[in-house]
Image (cartoon, grey):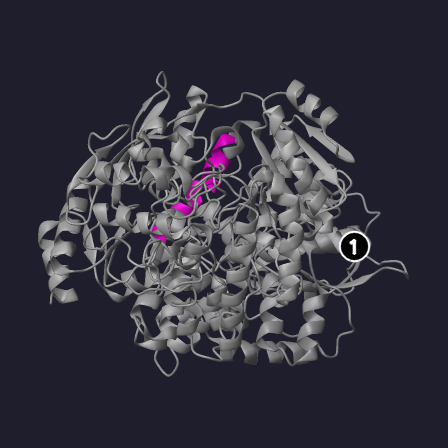
Amino acid sequence: MTSPGELERTLRSQLRGEVDFGAAARALTTMDASNYRRVPAGVVAPRDAGDVAAALRICADAGFPVVPRGGGTSIAGQATGVGVVLDLTRHMNALVSVDPVARTAVVQPGLVLDRLRDAVRPYGLAFGPDPSTHARCTLGGMIGNNACGAHSVAWGTTADNVTELAVTAYGGSSYRLGTGWAGAPDGLRELVAGNLAVLRTGLAGGFSRRISGYGGLDALLPERGVGVARAFCGSEGTLGVVTEAVVRLVEAPRAPVLAVLGYADESAAADAAAGLLGAGPLTVEGMARDLVPGAAAAGALPRGDAWLFVEMRDEGAARSLVRGADAAHSLLVTDPAGQRALWRIREDAAGTATRTPDGGMAWPGWEDCAVPPARLGAYLREFRALLAAHGLRGTPYGHFGEGCVHVRIDFDLVTPAGIARFRSFSGELADLVVSHGGSLSGEHGDGQARAELLPRMYGPEVISLFGAYKDVWDPAGGMNPGMLVRPARLDENLRFAALPPGGGELSHGVARCVGVAKCRTTEVGGPGVMCPSYRATGEELHSTRGRARLLHEMLAGEVVTDGWRSREVAEALDLCLSCKGCRSDCPVGVDMAAYKAEFLHHHWSGRIRPPAHYLLGGLPRLLRTVALLRAAAPLNAAARRLPPPGLTRDRPLPPLARTPFTRWWRSRAGESRPQGPGATAVTLWPDTFTEYLSPHTGRAAVRVLEAAGLDVTVPRGPVCCGLTYVSTGRLDRARTVLRRTLTRLEGAPDRPVVVLEPSCAAALRTDLPALLPDDPRAHRLAAAVRTFAEALEQYAPHWRPPRLDRPVVGQTHCHQHAVLGDAADRRLRERAGLTGELSGGCCGLAGNFGFEPGHHAVSVACAREQLLPSLDAARDSGPAILADGFSCRTQIAQLSPYRAHHLAELLADGLPIEGPADSP
């Protein structure tokens, strides 16, 4: 028998694409977005169709199975495999051509849907199917799953929008499929001819979302035009590999209008959905209040406890629909921005579904079953009762106009009792779906999650036909075995079984990553941050999901075998900027910055660390020593000539200030503005960056806070949030520093603590109580932390900031976006007449990250994605450039001709001049 090593060598010798049987490549592909885990032998990234054919021939000769993989967002396990995974996203991702007259496009399987949509938008065209993962799912994956999306009410499934397919089968044979028998594999025509009765009766009574099994086989009937390409769609990689596709495009509506209809409850909305289809809607989406936070719903949605989002082609059609609907309340939105805001509520609801109200996790497995729309209301009532009977929780939502329901359920997939309940519930739910004439899968395929249950939906003759169809295409059974035909049990290969019991917060955290791959989006614009390193490199290794997968495998110990000393995990985490964007942007709140800190803590335990960990990780202590020695000037001069060892030579170090902030503060004793007896006292936190590198920011903040009538004090001794120690994984040192800080603050009265540096404020709010969970002082300090804008809004609500009346551009700090929020900042800027939006994304410097060797290219790439272009675009309007983070200001200064300011500085400049101005 051929060994994995021999197979790898043969593939390397005959393929132009990459062949990787290493631990990291295998670990990255053990899971998709499902509950399942299978360990592959290796990963191949074919360069072209010739590589695909060679790989399938070599693997067949060696007896290794193959699974094709696109974005890896399948939720039923069909993108995992035990043989060779074909990664079709690396090279085979081209949009080959567009014919706007014929309204077709030729695409390769690894092309991300949004790239196709962006390319055809100038022609007024679109690809109709639009699953929620449109920013990272691939056309090949959509064909494999027969994906649908919100607009399938108008434009159908992927199968409805594919006209031709180039397919390579296990063994290397290639086919060109379309309509008619030309190009089909031998034996397929004969199989259909011998089973006409089964095709006409066993697959009869279908509806638009009958995706389960090889449910499109009836397309091969002569009266249906012998749609061989259509029948291939939805085969989940079990028949062959798509290497190219011709897809149909549709005319995009020029000015769609959104009608939001409010109903008393979910069942009422579901009952109403089918009645709206006669109006010709583009979408009919449904959700209930338990998926919508109160703040999001307040004022934005019409009254009710459930809603239908109905998109129509124009305003006239939308108004007609509202008049004819039986909704208690309604809202009509014509403004594109307003529509986007409402759709964001609907999209955010999909993320909310991954969590239970008490913060627990809900899992896929029954994500997308469907029933005929007229049966949806009755089905949902019985579904809710079935959940309750099993003691389970889940919140359905989805494509009500087609009877397709998304739901994640809080299964216990770890203990034997929980897994047994998962199995019994799955069987009962399958029976319920079938009793309503439904499909076990309505959108995402059956994979391992539901294939075992297909006999409950289809009779034995149809199941036998499915097996024969598979065997025509794949007689050796090498294409994605265990899916659809002769499937694995639905409770085998569960990904949680590999994790050690009692693995702690890291184990829970990496298990929480469900793999939907929002971190893989490359869409530019918007407030999101995650995941800057992936956006710079395009490598799965550098995505939040990829890092979570590697940590999962490190804890499992099967693929990544050297535990905390793992080089693979260290390499993946090296380019993590610790931006914390995933903490807020990931649907399940994966916090890779925290996981990186814990990994580095263990990885370097008992060993000499890289110099940067001591220099930059110990920055507060180092700079305090320099200040005590009054050595800032000679150190600045030395750094200009030669950077310290262990740091990059690609960028200069920011100069140290001659006079630290607290020295200036002590020098003005008795000069502070006298406040009235009722003035609120606030403590201004002298973070390391403000103290030693940007004291003018602190001075500006004092001036503004005092002008607002606040009584400002500053801690007497040195205090530190521990951020630099946390970011380099020196967690024991961070705990020591934080305890010392808390002790120094014990004599100070309780008062709000104003922190100017967003990263330090975020560290005090989140890292401090996490590192010292049993110290009540830590929780008190975390609760007292306020950003500069929050302090002014809460404690000086009647103060009127100076009117600056200028446009503003710049950077929202990553930690501000992810941890602190910027609502108060937006309101303060508006009151000061600062108009415009700050850049999303990440500046790329990220504290110590941009000064460490090997990071400069990624650091610059992050800045060039959104930040620097936004500055250049606004140059002619003479904007104020705003960046509250010291790293952001440094990056702007070093990579552009602009100088950025903290909001405190901008406001201070607008105050009346009192006495001699402070120099930086």
Q: Where the N terminus falls, by quadrant?
A: bottom left
Residue lying at 66% horizontally and 45% vertically, measured from the top left? 377
| Residue 719 locus on image (x, y percent) | 62, 72
For label 1, count other residues whose C-alpha is less than 10 Å away and answer few (under 14), some (14-19) or many (20+).
Answer: few
Q: Nearer the viewer, residue 167 or 721?
A: 167
| Callout 1 amino acid | Gln
Report the magenta stretch's main SS. Answer: helix
Q: Is residue 219 left or right of residue 368?
A: left
| Residue 791 locus on image (x, y percent) | 74, 56
Magenta highlight range: 856-873
Q: Nearer the viewer, residue 810 or 339?
A: 339
Where disc 1 sits, the SS reads: helix
Residue lying at 73% horizontally and 49% vertically, measured from the top left? 295
Residue lying at 70% horizontally and 28% vertically, measured from the top left? 332
Q: Quadrant of residue 3?
A: bottom left
Up-down relation of residue 75 to residue 502 (above or below): above
Residue at mark 1: 794
Q: Is residue 172 left or right of residue 544?
A: left
Give yes or no for residue 219 being in the magenta stretch.
no
Give yes or no for residue 870 being in the magenta stretch.
yes
